[in-house]
């Protein structure tokens, strides 16, 4: 099971930056979910994207986050 989900939008430059930060953090595999055209997700994440969610803990990182933040999230901290 994938432990990370990145909520993002189409054509989102901040989402592109988040992907670069996740690569720098050597984050494990993750699932991308696009919130466009998803009313429930749009309500929850609309102004917050990109958001990185750690599924086991339910913790979320709102943008901006850095590589150290991602590593702490992955470690469960």
Image: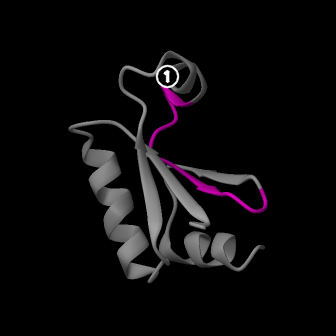
> 28 and 52: which one is in front?
28
Q: How many marks?
A: 1
The x and y percentages for residue 50 are: 45, 45
Which structural element holds mark 1?
Answer: helix
Magenta run includes residue 52: yes
As drawn, the residue found furthest toward the front would be 1
Q: Main secondary structure of the magenta part?
A: loop
Is residue 70 a member of the stretch shown in magenta?
A: no
In x, y percent, where is residue 3?
62, 66
Seen at 20% across and 38% down, the residue is 11
Along the viewing direction, whichever of 47 and 40 lies nearer the viewer: 40
The answer to whether residue 61 is left or right of residue 50 is: right
Q: Residue at x 60, y 78 (%)?
A: 71
Residue 18 sits above or below residue 69 on the image: above
Q: According to the image, label 1 marks what residue?
A: 42
Q: Quadrant of the C terminus?
A: bottom right
Q: Residue at x 64, y 74 (%)?
A: 74
Q: Nearer the viewer, residue 71 or 66?
A: 71
Q: Which residues are magenta?
A: 45-57
Q: Quadrant of residue 72?
A: bottom right
Residue 63 coordinates in the image, percent (x, y): 50, 49
In this image, 62 relative to 20: left or right? right
């Amino acid at each position: 099971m994938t432990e990370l989900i990145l909520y993002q939008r189409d054509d989102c430059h901040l989402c592109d930056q988040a992907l670069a930060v996740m690569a720098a953090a050597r984050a494990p595999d993750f699932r991308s979910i696009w919130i466009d055209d998803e009313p429930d997700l749009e309500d929850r994440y609309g102004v917050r994207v990109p958001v990185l969610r750690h599924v086991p803990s339910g913790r979320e990182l709102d943008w901006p986050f850095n590589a150290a933040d991602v590593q702490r999230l992955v470690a469960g901290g």
